[in-house]
Image (spheres, grey):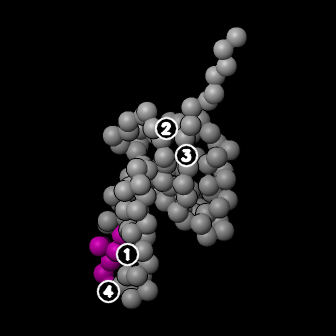
């Protein structure tokens, strides 16, 4: 099942369009999630929100290799889709309540003959 990827800025809209006032627990949870996102970005990660059709979700912080410059986290989506096993692990962890996950991308080691 292919997930939907959203830019991390979508978090800034959560709760903005609600008709009722959010509870204090919802406000604290949102603030905590925003702080985690900001912490990941300040550590040099690219952050995406990953949603599956059954509404499981995770905030995915992707650390690219040091020599790779990424201007928009959405540039990483094709690489993520090429690794369905990793996405499946991310989804399984989201089911267990791990909604902030780090993924470090590395270049494959090449051997010279």
Helix, strand or loop for disc 3: strand
Q: Residues within 10 Å of mark 1 (few under 14, many from 20)?
A: few
Residue at label 2? 65
In three-dimensional space, the C-alpha distance between marks 2 and 3, rounded to whole angstroms, equals: 8 Å
Helix, strand or loop for disc 4: loop
Residue at label 3? 104
Relative image position of residue 77 (x, y in whole percent): 48, 41
- Vertical position of residue 56 compared to residue 76: above or below: below
Helix, strand or loop for disc 1: helix
In three-dimensional space, the C-alpha distance between marks 1 and 4, rounded to whole angstroms, equals: 15 Å
Which residue appears at 48% of the width and 53% of the height? 61
Q: Residues within 10 Å of mark 2 (few under 14, many from 20)?
A: few
Q: Tell me if label 4 and label 2 are in contact, CB under 8 Å.
A: no
Closer to us: 66 or 52:
66
Of pointers 3 and 1, the one earlier in the residue sequence: 1
The span shown in magenta is 14-21
Tag shown at residue 21: 4
- Vertical position of residue 23 compared to residue 30: above or below: below
Main SS, magenta region, reads loop
In three-dimensional space, the C-alpha distance between marks 4 and 3, rounded to whole angstroms, equals: 38 Å
In three-dimensional space, the C-alpha distance between marks 3 and 1, rounded to whole angstroms, equals: 25 Å
Of pointers 4 and 2, the one earlier in the residue sequence: 4
Residue at label 1? 31
Relative image position of residue 63 (x, y in whole percent): 48, 46
């Amino acid at each position: 099942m292919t997930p939907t990827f959203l830019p991390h800025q979508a978090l800034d809209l959560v709760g903005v369009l609600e008709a009722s006032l959010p509870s204090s627990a919802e406000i604290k949870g949102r603030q905590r999630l925003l702080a985690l996102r900001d912490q990941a970005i300040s550590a040099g990660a690219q952050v995406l929100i990953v949603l599956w059709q059954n509404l499981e979700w995770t905030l995915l912080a992707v650390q690219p290799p040091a020599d790779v410059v990424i201007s928009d986290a959405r540039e990483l989506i094709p690489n993520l889709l090429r690794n369905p096993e990793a996405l499946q692990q991310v989804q399984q962890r989201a089911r267990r309540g791990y909604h902030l996950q780090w993924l470090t991308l590395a270049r494959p080691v090449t051997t010279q003959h």
